[in-house]
Amino acid sequence: MERKHREEVVRDFQSSANWWWFASHLLASIHYISGLSALLLSIIVASRPPVLMDNHADIVVQNLAWISAFLTGAISFLSAKDSSVRHMQAYRMLQEAIHRYLHAETPDYELLVKARETGAMLIDYAQQSFRSIPDLKIL
């Protein structure tokens, strides 16, 4: 009975952790797909391969250069990789707290709450100063 009660308590926290895991992988995918696309397009524009050199070559090359520049700027502006890392750190922190809660002799609910709050602050790092985050060593 005790185990079932603990699993019910953890369900909401696990939902947050699962979302952070998904967001981390999504942001990492966006970062790498955009980066590789920008790299490939830059190489194509710089090398001007014969297959692209027809009557409208200048227009094609200009459009590819514009798309490459846009993707490069988007990668820099969005910081998807950094955000992905913060989401994964938050996920791991909350997963550790969930594991401790489920397997401890005397579960500490406050540990779960503090782990989720600290994880949320890690994710929102871009909107606040890192120094304003309280003690990150909660576990």
Image (cartoon, rainbow, N blue to C red):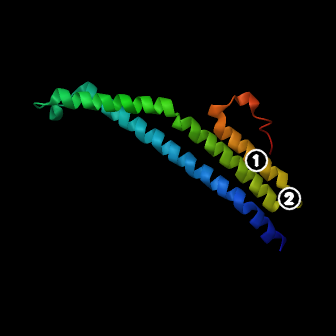
Number of other residues with Cα within 10 Å of mark 2, as a class: few under 14, some 14 to 19, many 20 or more: some
Up/down of 96 relative to 135, above or below? below
Q: Earlier in the sequence, mark 1 or mark 2?
A: 2
Q: Residue type at mark 1: give it.
A: Ala
Which residue is located at x 45 percent, y 40 percent?
Answer: 32
- Residue occupying the far left of the picture: 55
User: Gap between marks 1 and 2, in whole Å?
Assistant: 14 Å
Q: Position of residue 129 (x, y in %)?
A: 69, 28
The image quadrant of residue 51 is top left
Position of 2 relative to 76 (above/below): below
Question: Is 101 above or below relative to 86?
Answer: below
113 lies above or below 30? below
Quarter residue 99 falls in: bottom right
- Camera-side residue of 85 and 65: 65
Q: Mark 1 sits on what residue? A: 115
Quick check: can you spot residue 44?
Answer: no
Q: Could you tell me which residue is drawn at 75 percent across and 66 percent down?
A: 8
Q: Residue furthest bottom?
A: 1
**Secondary structure found at label 2:** loop
Helix, strand, or loop for circle 1?
A: helix
The quadrant of the picture occupied by the N terminus is bottom right
Residue at 80%, 36% (x, y): give it.
135
Q: Determine contact: label 1, label 2, CB under 8 Å.
A: no
What x and y, as percent, mark residue 119? Answer: 70, 44
Question: Residue 13: in sight, yes or no?
Answer: yes
| Residue 83 horizontal/vertical position (percent) | 58, 38
Residue most extreme to the right: 106
The residue pinned by badge 2 equals 107
| Quarter assignment of residue 3 | bottom right
